[in-house]
Amino acid sequence: GDSVTQMEGPVTLSEEAFLTINCTYTATGYPSLFWYVQYPGEGLQLLLKATKADDKGSNKGFEATYRKETTSFHLEKGSVQVSDSAVYFCALRTDSWGKLQFGAGTQVVVTP
Amino acid sequence: GAGVSQTPSNKVTEKGKYVELRCDPISGHTALYWYRQSLGQGPEFLIYFQGTGAADDSGLPNDRFFAVRPEGSVSTLKIQRTERGDSAVYLCASSLNGGDGYTFGSGTRLTVV
């Protein structure tokens, strides 16, 4: 079945450091890929998405490229801020009506 | 409303009791989804409604779980004979017409003691 694997957290880094969160997937067909973010005390929010191979999703300084050859969708940000502290979820969708398969989440802690 | 509203935000119940969790989606959103998030895990799909009907309930773990959406707006997730393993955050999301434009609520944290 479909699955998403992402690196375990917590990831702790200093402000202005470079962030990478690895995500790989297994799916039949050609899924759409997503990164969701959950800030403390808030609901899940869509951060970025890519719907086909080689697409790059970007938002708020975060980027991720859909790599079909390596079945990956790694999240990156060049210079993190304390406000980026959150839990990040990689997810995929293979059905047109939008059922999502999530990874386990990666907690990111950014210290001043 | 402006967002997806879930009530209550927290619910503590005794093992064996019945609970209802409510989701009020964004006005006009035809698709509604329920997910369950256990501690340290990603959300797990439970059920999806398109309008009033359950289009896919394959994620419901067993027959103690049931959900309704009688008027195509508010949805209620019902859990009978609760067990400690049901403790989790129950998330609701809505979308205008399926696809990837989800808006999630803040969830209901259910604790079964």
Image (spheres, coloured by chain):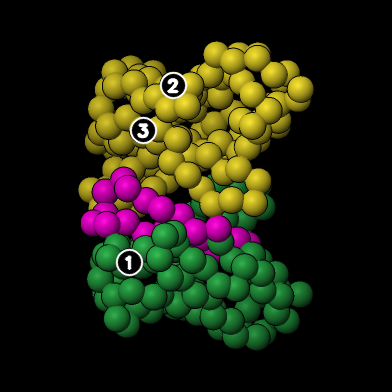
Chain colours: A yellow, B green
Nearer mark to the viewer, of 2 and 1 = 1
What's the chain of the residue with tag 2? A
Q: CA distance from mark 2 to mark 1?
A: 31 Å
Q: Which amino acid type is marked by label 1?
A: Ser
Q: In the rendering, which numbered label is found on residue A49?
A: 3
Residue A74 appears in the picture as rendered? no
Q: Is label 2 in contact with label 3 (beta carbons under 8 Å)? A: no
Nearer mark to the viewer, of 1 and 3 = 1
Residue B92 belongs to magenta span = yes
Q: A77 above or below B39?
A: above
- Secondary element type, mark 3: strand
Q: Quadrant of residue B55?
A: bottom left
Q: Residue at x 43, y 70 (%)?
A: B24
Residue carrying label 2: A63
- Secondary element type, mark 1: loop
Q: Quadrant of the C terminus of chain A?
A: top right
In this rendering, would A45 be left or right of B50?
right
Q: CA distance from mark 1 to mark 3?
A: 24 Å
Residue carrying label 1: B27
Look at the image and give the residue range highlighted in magenta: B88-106
- Secondary element type, mark 2: strand
What's the chain of the residue with tag 1? B
Q: Nearer the viewer, residue B96 or B38?
A: B96
